[in-house]
Image (cartoon, helix red, strand yellow):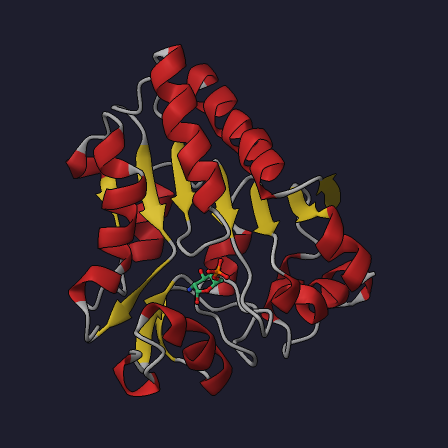
């Protein structure tokens, strides 16, 4: 794991968006693994601005999103909508090349990724309890795309997107598994919020621990962790 300590989330967004652009310029038909949530937001904002300025096309790019809620009470909070608003509608993506896990493609999602050539660059956030995608504590390291029941911690944390009303937060999701994520050629994880301090501490000093799912990636040969200085200082 390589650690990049940045001044603030703006600097993270700037650096990570440059990594994505560098890849797409070198490989116009790259396969991107994409994440939602507040962590990658700065990266997406910078990516859209710079791709437009530099005239980089995403038309040949294939994307695989990590996860999606099941039975989402508020359609505006689905990850489909998040991605459309913050990334897909702003650039020249080809709608036919944008993939999300769902009940329909659950058993073929990993095969779809493999057929596309595998994920070149996987963006990741991390949950307060160390989840990646929606792989909650206890998820086996060899898991592929699956249905998951969200933990109480995750539902409480995500209630901020559902009027702080826990009853409105979905109870289940479809998520790529830990093995799906670990199969990516390059992983970039972003963490910029102090609520992630304990989870990041485990990544900095821990060993593979099924109670902290992100530690399943510790042995990945090309895993970059981008942190704000404030979070790094609090977590170390
Ligand atoms: C959600 C998503 C994860 C995301 C995590 C952290 O539950 N399923 O993919 O990484 O929460 O979100 P945020 O970046 O908003 O803190």
- Where residue 116 sits in the image (x, y, percent)? 33, 38
Position of residue 203 in the picture relative to residue 192 (left or right): right
- Against 204, residue 213 (above or below) is below
- Image quarter for residue 130? bottom right
- The residue at 61%/59% (across/down) is 193
- The residue at 69%/74% (across/down) is 209
- Image quarter for residue 76? bottom left
- Against 144, residue 189 (above or below) is above
- Image quarter for residue 44? top left
- Where residue 213 sits in the image (x, y, percent)? 59, 70
- The residue at 32%/29% (across/down) is 61
Quarter placement of the C terminus:
bottom right
Q: Along the line of sight, which residue is nearer the eye, 34 or 178?
A: 34
- Where residue 234 sits in the image (x, y, percent)? 78, 62
- Where residue 123 sits in the image (x, y, percent)? 49, 45
- Against 12, residue 78 (above or below) is below
- The residue at 76%/65% (across/down) is 201
């Amino acid at each position: 794991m390589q650690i990049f300590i940045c001044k603030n989330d703006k600097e993270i967004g700037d650096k990570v968006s440059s990594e994505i652009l560098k890849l797409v310029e070198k490989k116009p038909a790259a396969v991107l693994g994409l994440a939602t949530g507040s962590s990658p937001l700065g990266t997406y904002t910078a990516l859209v601005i710079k791709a437009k300025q530099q005239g980089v096309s995403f038309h040949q790019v294939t994307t695989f999103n990590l996860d999606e809620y099941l039975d989402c009470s508020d359609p505006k909070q689905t990850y489909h909508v998040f991605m459309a608003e913050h990334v897909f509608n702003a650039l020249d993506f080809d709608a036919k090349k944008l993939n999300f896990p769902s009940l329909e493609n659950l058993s073929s999602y990993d095969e779809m990724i493999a057929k596309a050539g595998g994920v070149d660059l996987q963006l990741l956030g991390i949950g307060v309890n160390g989840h990646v995608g929606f792989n909650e504590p206890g998820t086996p390291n060899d898991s592929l795309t699956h249905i998951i029941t969200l933990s109480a911690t995750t539902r409480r944390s995500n209630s901020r997107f559902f009027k702080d009303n826990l009853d409105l937060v979905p109870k289940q999701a479809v998520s790529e598994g830990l093995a799906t994520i670990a199969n990516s050629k390059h992983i970039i994880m972003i963490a910029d919020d102090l609520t992630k301090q304990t989870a990041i501490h485990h990544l900095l000093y821990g060993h593979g621990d099924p109670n902290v799912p992100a530690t399943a990636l510790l042995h990945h040969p090309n895993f970059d962790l981008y942190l704000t200085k404030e979070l790094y200082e609090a977590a170390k």
